[in-house]
Amino acid sequence: MSAKGRARMRYFETRSFQSPYIGSTEAVSPLSAFWALLCGPAYYWRKRAPIEALLFALALGALLFLDEDRDIAGASGGIDIGTMLWLGFALAAPVLLPACYRRKGWVEVAKRGL
């Protein structure tokens, strides 16, 4: 299997990570994208990924200061940049959360495929 195929499969796996310090466990599955789509930065915060939650919230907050008449994405009347940002963070949840846990030193304890 190619590296691209393995990366695609990791996106669809359910994985669990455990903190070596406090022993808490967090699961990451493809449903993470759905919950991040519904809850936004609050989902990242609840999943113990504060840096990702703050980046998401700050990026959304920065959009409040943009001029509404100026079109950044070049797609007038289409999907605005806030929607693209929200969708991007939501679809990236199954990738960002494991990266956050690994960065914090958490250990992967379980992996299940579809």
Image (tube, helix red, strand yellow):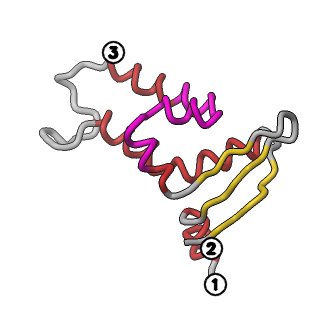
Secondary structure mostly seen in the magenta stretch: helix
Q: Amino acid at mark 2?
A: Arg
Q: What residue span does the magenta drawing correspond to?
A: 34-55
Residue at the spot 37% in from the left edge and 45% down from the top edge: 87
Q: Is residue 7 left or right of residue 78?
A: right
What residue would you read off at disc 3? 65
Quarter of the view holding residue 100: top right
What residue would you read off at disc 2? 6
Point out the frontmost of discs 1 and 3: 1
What residue would you read off at disc 1? 1
Q: Is residue 45 left or right of residue 88?
A: right
Q: Amino acid at mark 1?
A: Met
SS state under label 1: loop
Q: Is residue 65 above or below residue 39?
A: above
Label 1 Cα crowd, 10 Å radius (few <14 / some 14-19 / many 20+): few
Could you tell which of marks 2 and 1 lies nearer the N-terminus?
Answer: 1
Q: Is residue 59 left or right of residue 51?
A: left
